Image: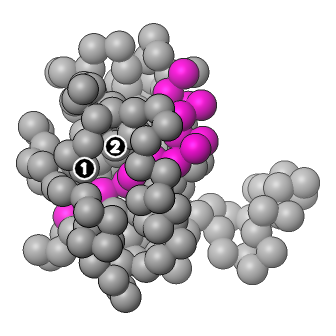
Amino acid sequence: MHTTGYLENADQMMERIKKGAFLTVLADGKVNTMTIGWATIGYIWQRPVFMIAVRDSRHTFSLLEKTDNFTVTVPAPNTFHDAVMTCGTKSGRDIDKFKECGLQQKAAQLVQSPIIDIPGNHYECRIVYKSAMDSTFLDADMEKLYPKKDYHTLYFGEILACYAIL
């Protein structure tokens, strides 16, 4: 396992993720990346885990449903703001986000999905559990986050590798 410092820096990493990180998935020969701002890094089932939340309306959702892995690239602080915005507001069904944003892919070390080749922190994850949200169990105060009732599917990825590229 290549996970140096994956939990020790989780609070700092979560602050950076709130500003936007890239979730990248390869399935059926297609690669897509999207911006995430909601995630959790922790330890469950005797392993380090990165939990992501993806709405089923997202193009990345259809790819995640066809694979067992994903990567998350957290850009170095104060970098790639425009790419984060584009990848969070435009769909990979309509544009090539890599070309549009000038992003390059790089082979991951342990999973099939690539990382984004930029300075920052990179997580390579294998999906160990997923669950579609059931609004029956959602705190009523959280419903305001879902005015269209477009709930997330939660993907728990075992962190197989975590490293920084400077």
Whichever of labels 2 and 1 marks the residue nearer the N terminus, that label is 2
The region drawn magenta spans 12-26
Is residue 15 part of the magenta span, yes or no? yes
At 78% from the left and 62% from the top, the residue drawn is: 145
Residue 68, quarter of picture: bottom left
- Residue position marked by numbered label 2 in the rendering: 73
Left or right placement of residue 5 versus residue 163 in this view: right
Closer to the camera in the image, 131 or 149: 149
Residue 94, quarter of picture: bottom left
At 19% from the left and 21% from the top, the residue drawn is: 2
What percent of the width, then of the height, locates residue 26? Answer: 20, 64
At 59% from the left and 64% from the top, the residue drawn is: 152
Left or right placement of residue 127 versus residue 138 in this view: left
Q: Residues within 10 Å of mark 2 (few under 14, many from 20)?
A: many
**Please, what secondary structure does the residue beneath circle 1 have?**
strand
Marks 2 and 1, Cα distance to the nearest angstrom? 6 Å
Kindly tell me whether residue 50 is visible in this rendering. yes
The disc at residue 136 is: none
Give yes or no for contact between labels 2 and 1 (Cβ–Cβ under 8 Å). yes
Q: Residue furthest right?
A: 141
Is residue 165 part of the magenta span, yes or no? no
Identify residue type, mark 1.
Ile
Closer to the camera in the image, 120 or 127: 120
Identify residue type, mark 2.
Thr
Residue 143, quarter of picture: bottom right
Q: Is residue 111 above or below residue 138?
A: above
The disc at residue 116 is: 1
At 45% from the left and 11% from the top, the residue drawn is: 8
Q: Residues within 10 Å of mark 1 (few under 14, many from 20)?
A: many
Kindly tell me whether residue 159 is visible in this rendering. no
What percent of the width, then of the height, locates residue 132? Answer: 55, 64
